[in-house]
Image: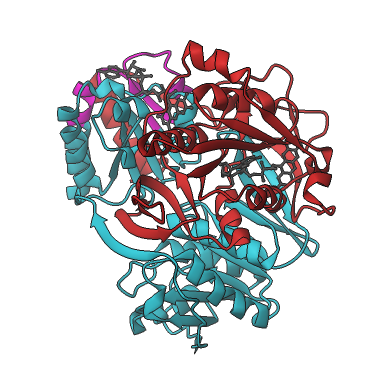
Amino acid sequence: MANAFWCIVEDDRRGAPKKVMAEVIGEAARVSSGQAEAVWLTDTATEAGLTQLAEWGATKVWLLENAALAPYRGEIWVGAAAELAAKERPKAIFAPVTSRAREFVARLAARLGVGLAADCVAFAMEGDRLVATRPVYAGKLLAKVTWAKTPWVATLRPNVFRPAEARPGRTATVERPTAATAAAQMRFVERREEVSTGLPELTEAEIVLSGGRGMKGPEHYVILEDMARVIGAAVGASRAAVDAGWRPHRFQIGQTGRTISPKLYMGFGVSGAIQHLAGMRTSKVIVAVNKDAEAPIFKIADYGIVADLFEVVPELTKEFKKLLEK
Amino acid sequence: MKILVAVKQVPDTATQVKISADPRAIDTTGITWIVSPYDEFAVEEALRIKEKRGQGEVVAVSLGPERVKEALRSCLAMGCDRAIHLNDPAWNDADTLVTSKALAAVVKQEAPQLLLCGRQAIDDDMGAVAAQLAELLGWPCASWIMEEAIDGDGKTVRTARQVEGGLEVFDLPLPAVLTAQKGLNEPRYPTLRGIMGAKKKEIRDVKAADLGWAPEPPQLSVVTLEALPPRPPGRILQGDVPTAVKELVRSLREEAKAI
Ligand SMILES: Cc1cc2nc3c(=O)[nH]c(=O)nc-3n(C[C@@H](O)[C@H](O)[C@H](O)COP(=O)(O)OP(=O)(O)OC[C@H]3O[C@@H](n4cnc5c(N)ncnc54)[C@H](O)[C@@H]3O)c2cc1C
Ligand SMILES: Cc1cc2nc3c(=O)[nH]c(=O)nc-3n(C[C@H](O)[C@H](O)[C@H](O)COP(=O)(O)OP(=O)(O)OC[C@H]3O[C@@H](n4cnc5c(N)ncnc54)[C@H](O)[C@@H]3O)c2cc1C
């Protein structure tokens, strides 16, 4: 439909949409006054997954289900989605910031000849144009941008937008257009799983604990992992800790690592360099534990404790346990 | 094997950025400019491929104003063989798509076997130009790569891209586009000899007319830049560690409702 806001579905590769889709659909529905539609390219969709999208508020689900669509390859996805977009002429195309969606919508925007705003943190309709807000220059400034024509293509930073409530009973029509899949140039060889920490994914977690150079060595991260298990957090690190080889790079928070925006960020022995802040300054609540009262991280922290982290962390874990056992 | 590396010149992250009199742009006085860090990984990888194969050419390409020559010069000092500078006021208001179209026109002229880019430029942070180049060229593309290996006869590249929860390994026929993620390599520092040698290497200026460029309006435009809204002042929790910790947990639960 010409007024539809498409939401490109990010799934768990097992047939269910990820919970970040509640945020994307929620924001699309808010901006468009209820015209959010889901577009799902996958090799396996489940009924439960389709229901979930409807309950979050998608009025229609465009399901492009085809074995050739997994794992994600831009060259195949773009053809399939562009054909549908040419027919349906959506007003906007939203997607969460994930490794694949980010590449995919950039290619799609190029195919459609329209603008792309990546990693947006706010949207507003101004008259009949959409204005998006996105952090630039390591999050030191915000840029407001707008498009010359539709569809307005944008990616949304996870954990920033208010998620849609799942309302049981809401339904969506499911359309299953036949997707044209181009011959693949890229040949899939294998997927190498990361060794699971048993903790949430850094970019998806609601609480993130971050350990910096003050952790003094790789063997001490176990105290953060203990706390993380108690409160359901992910554990990240500063670049100093990653460069020292204490943590793999995928755990790095910051400008040359992951951008996170959790409900709660707690930094332990992190000084708060500008490049670290670039990756976490949109966190809702920031806690800093550092023995140096002058550390720059205290300038953006909501709560700070000036003390030795090795005294604070075990105490804090104990208090969290007490609180959550109640 | 000919490899093109697209590099962007960006403000050093440590420098302060201020909004200029035109609220859509930053004030560039006093800014230190650097090669975007991810693009350094791309340059390094290109040089390693050439060294491993014992032959080839590495060409650095950048679009931007006159100052961009400095960034190209440092790529030459690292070891790139020559550089191309897309330098024309026609591209002053370029968005990602215009940037990609201009770069694609040069890539077509140069016809390399491989195009290496950074994962994203650390100023505008779109992470889009490489994917859009792939689209415009009709080449396969792997983003956020952590490793790559080109086969002996230079026909395919095997590469591992970083995704949530792991790595996905693909074979891509060449020519292809790859974007460098941190962890791919450690970029070298230019040697004194490299810096001296760079002065003699060619930086070719390319004007819009050289590409038969027809004016192209940006599809995305900046309405305004704004300073960050100030965060409400924080609180240092006083007392000994057990007291401060108790107060933190109470505040997180009752005030911030974060736990
Ligand atoms: C005066 C001025 C006006 C501008 N006006 C607008 C505007 O109206 N609308 C708008 O959307 N943007 C505008 N921009 C920003 C803009 O042109 C972006 O830099 C461009 O869109 C590229 O996006 P990015 O920097 O996020 O690159 P990304 O997509 O993050 O870059 C990914 C990779 O692509 C390559 N790459 C990116 N840019 C270049 C380049 N210039 N040369 C060579 N390789 C490159 C690099 O390998 C890089 O690592 C303006 C910039 C300036 C200086
Ligand atoms: C181009 C570029 C990109 C970069 N990208 C990133 C990035 O993505 N992410 C990133 O994090 N950095 C990045 N950096 C690096 C950044 O500039 C800092 O060097 C880095 O963030 C510092 O890490 P840190 O805070 O752990 O270490 P430090 O700055 O050394 O701080 C350690 C802190 O721990 C405190 N401390 C020590 N012992 C204790 C203790 N027992 N108890 C409590 N506190 C203690 C100290 O007081 C100090 O404040 C980048 C730099 C550049 C130039």
Residue at the spot x=68%, y=26% of the render?
A: B69
Chain identifier, colour cyan: A
Position of residue A203 measured from the top left corner of the image (x, y, whole percent):
38, 49
- Residue B76: percent from the left, percent from the top? 56, 25
Q: Is residue A121 visible?
A: no
Residue A182 lies within the magenta run: no
- The span picked out in magenta is A287-315
Q: How many marks?
A: 0
The reply to whether residue B231 is in sight is yes
Residue A299 colored in magenta in the image: yes
Q: Nearer the viewer, residue A97 or A158?
A: A97
Which one is in front, B8 or A64? B8
Chain letter, red = B
Where does the image place residue B134, in percent across and percent down from the top left?
56, 57
Q: Is residue B158 above or below residue A62?
A: above
- Residue at image point 65% right, 22% down: B70
Judged from the image, the quadrant occupied by ligand 1 is top right
Q: Nearer the viewer, residue A244 or B60?
A: B60
- Residue at image point 43% right, 39% down: A285
Percent coordinates x, y for residue B33 in the rendering: 63, 23
Residue A15, compared with residue A243, is above or below; it is below
Colouring mode (rainbow / by chain / secondary structure / one colour): by chain
